[in-house]
Image (cartoon, helix red, strand yellow):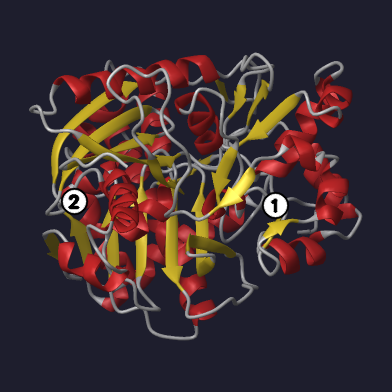
Amino acid sequence: MRRGELLMAIDQGTTNTKAILVARDGRSIFVASSPTRLFQPRPDFVEQSPVALWESVTKVVSDCIRNRQREEIAAIGISNQRETVVAWERRTGEPVAPAIIWQCRRSAAICAELEQSGREKVLRERTGLGIDPLFSGSKMRWLLENVVGLGKRAEAGEICFGTVDSWLIWKLTGRKVFACDASNASRTQLFNLRTGDWDDDLLRLFRVPRIALPEVRDSSGFFGECIGIAGLEGIPILSAMGDSHAAMAGHASYAPGTIKATYGTGSSVMTLLPELRLAKSGVATTIAWQIQRKPRFALEGNISMTGSAVQWVGEFLGLPDPVIDTVKLSEATEDSAGVYFVPAMVGLGAPHWDTEVRGVLMGLGRGSRATHMARAAIESIAFQIRDVFDAMQSEAGCALPVLYADGGGTRNNWLMQFQADILGTPVLRSEQEELSALGAAWMAGLVLGWWSSLTELESLRGETKEFLPQMTALQREQLYAGWKNAIARTRYRPDRKGRLQ
């Protein structure tokens, strides 16, 4: 392996791709970013161009190489948007369809069929996941059933199906390595948590040929060397992780009961477990990461729309800069004046897992204004996090004394304070903005021996800002009761006689 003084981490997210350079002391010293576009060709369809994703990677990599201050890059780590599915030709490397993004609901009918056939129990027992279009397996089956000839080609070994990490590894290694890591595999609903391998019964259920899937490797380990990338020739790829898992690693707190929330396009709440434990109340069991063939398990709750809910409101209101202007609007009022916004435009994720519902704006009065809608959008993020936090605390069987927070949404101080208030729990915001990339870089550094263990990584923990609850218990529970009422109304589906189902 080449000896260098820097690690490069590539963080391929839903709305942008970033790359950072990390020094031996564990600090990020340079960040490059490139936006990525989402397309919605039909209602409930969300997709991206795999070629454009790769081009965004080459751009940020080039930016890092130009700014590496003559120091060699020792290794590369990868963090990526999860559950998203890419399908490409093994011989040419050309995509055969757009990437189906994790938010996409096109496979809802497949999931409904699985629920009606009573497959929920076996899926949860083997994969730790409930049935939902979020996960990759139903997306792969949709492609196999809807792209002409794809099923036969996949069975013949001509097609590769992968999560985004496997697509990037394939491209970075010049089509030499077809592999993903265990954290990404655990989000596909095709991976057996107990055996640590693709599950043949589930592959048959989703009609995915084993030959079309990547080899599953450790999150921290050797994935191959870069080929054909200017400035990266021969540099090893030494880590790959789903972005939420990498952010968990980046908080540098590895004790069971550590819980974090990542605030992005959607949000992930994750808490580490001492051993494999299958969840029951609306959250999932997943692999946080795998090192030396030993998986570290976690509970996780996924929320489809948090940051994207703010953007949706800004677009609905016709604001020039949907996100920034919505945040500004929200700051122009003291409260939401009883307005609640449930951003279920693509259904509800954890802990409700309801694909049928759609968004609701309620509590409107004669005096309601755009400012109240904007404030309700910001508040909906904190309310959804509490929904998952409460479910997770019940499942974890122990107190969760503090919430670690990361992601773009945490830059909003008001949101962080409201989050602490509505939880009644302190929130520790990481001051490291690129936490997913940082976690991936640290995992690569473990392979190089820069750090000897996760315990040593704890010494790299960056600065945090603490937000303490200030709201009274009565205020908190009144506001949250209003949110639960909004959720109940959102999910209300009367039968033919008008009774609640």
- Image coordinates for residue 237, horizontal then vertical, percent: 40, 40
Quadrant location, the N terminus: top left
Q: Which mark is residue 133?
A: none
Which residue appears farthest toward the left when viewing the image? Answer: 69
Describe the element under mark 2 as helix, strand or loop. Answer: helix
- Image coordinates for residue 355, horizontal then vertical, percent: 68, 45
Image position of 329 (left or right of 478): left
* Dot 1 alpha-carbon crowd within 10 angstroms: few under 14, some 14 to 19, many 20 or more: many
In the picture of the structure, the residue carrying the numbered disc 2 is: 414
119, 92: nearer the viewer: 92
Describe the element under mark 1 as helix, strand or loop. Answer: loop
Image position of 295 (left or right of 91): left
Q: Amino acid at mark 2?
A: Trp
Q: CA distance from mark 2 to mark 1?
A: 37 Å
In the picture of the structure, the residue carrying the numbered disc 1 is: 189
- Image coordinates for residue 92, horizontal then vertical, percent: 65, 13
Closer to the chain start, of discs 2 and 1, is 1
26, 391: nearer the viewer: 26
Q: Is residue 225 above or below residue 497?
A: above
> Which residue is at a point 42% across and 37% down the rendered structure image?
309
> Which residue is at a point 24% across and 49% down the rendered structure image?
410
- Image coordinates for residue 133, horizontal then vertical, percent: 68, 42
Q: Is residue 225 above or below residue 339?
A: above
Image position of 312 (left or right of 406): right
Image position of 271 (left or right of 102): left
Count of marks overlaid on the render: 2
Q: Visible in this render: residue 304?
A: yes
397, 157: nearer the viewer: 157
Tell me if label 2 and label 1 are in contact, CB under 8 Å. no
Residue 256, located in which quarter of the rendered image? bottom left
